[in-house]
Amino acid sequence: MTGTDPDASPVRPSFTAHRGESHDAPENTLAAFRLAWQRGIKTVELDVRLSADRQLMVCHDADTLRTTGVRLVVAESKCSELQRLDAGSWKGPEWAGERIPTLDEALAELPSDCAYWIEIKSGPETAQPLAEALARADVQADRATVISFSDDALRAFSKIAPGYSAQLISGFRRTEHAWEPTLDELIGRGLALGVSALGVHHEGPWTEEACRHVHAAGLALCVWTVDDAELGCRMASLGMDAITSNRAAWLREAMYPIVRP
């Protein structure tokens, strides 16, 4: 299914670099974000957590062990402590010295024609400092989308900064008779929160009819995390609007080799 002609369908999905180009560079680092932009990927997803001194750190896990070899709990550590760690060497010697960035540092790197999807990992207490960081960096509403699994976090942020788009993220669990949550349940949550899109795992109740059902409710569909070209083509053919990948540039080329950014 690779090599699909992009002209075969009227709309091609966009591609989002999951934690940057994290297949090739250390995730959630400035190096991974820069690599995505260098490769023509216009949207980068990153994760934020509050440190003990209320700095927004770009880090997925609750602690730093997996990506630094040293276990510091982000919520219990100061920014200065977290930034002394090497967050690059685990990926390869060429990345030695990469640090855990603050959101302020990441926003300062954002090219004028690119955007971030910012996933809230800490909870609703993140909303105020996140809104303040976006305001400090003068990041306009079309260049940042706030995403989360947490209804409370999205509700808190939207109350403070209603101009930004939001995305509700969800996975699915297969039971004997159905997928949980149901699409109607997920759509209902999304509409109640006022989000513009649902961010969904590729393992779920996905058919063309299911995608049309979500679109009919006025919500876009963004699927994660797809690193396989055949799966990406299937998701695109069903009607997904965006595909998040650890290797977004490679996936775009594998799916649509005649298209250049």
Image (cartoon, rainbow, N blue to C red):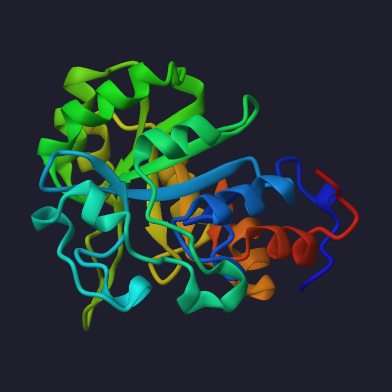
Residue beneath the point at 12% across and 41% down: 53
One can see residue 202 in this view: yes
Residue beneath the point at 19% across and 63% down: 62
Residue 144, percent from left and from top: 44, 30
In this picture, is 95 found above or below 138?
below
Foreground of the two, 257 or 12: 257
Side (left or right) of 83 relative to 242 = left
In this picture, is 177 found above or below 107?
below
Check the image and name the residue furthest to the bottom.
176
Residue 115, percent from left and from top: 54, 34
Quadrant where the image shows the C terminus: top right
One can see residue 14 in this view: no
Foreground of the two, 146 or 176: 146
The answer to which quarter of the image holds residue 17 is bottom right
Residue beneath the point at 32% across and 54% down: 83
Check the image and name the residue furthest to the right.
258
Quadrant where the image shows the N terminus: bottom right
The answer to which quarter of the image holds residue 203 is bottom left
Residue 173, percent from left and from top: 25, 73
Side (left or right) of 92 relative to 133 = right
Residue beneath the point at 26% across and 31% down: 130
Q: How many marks?
A: 0
Side (left or right) of 260 relative to 101 = right
Residue 169, percent from left and from top: 31, 51
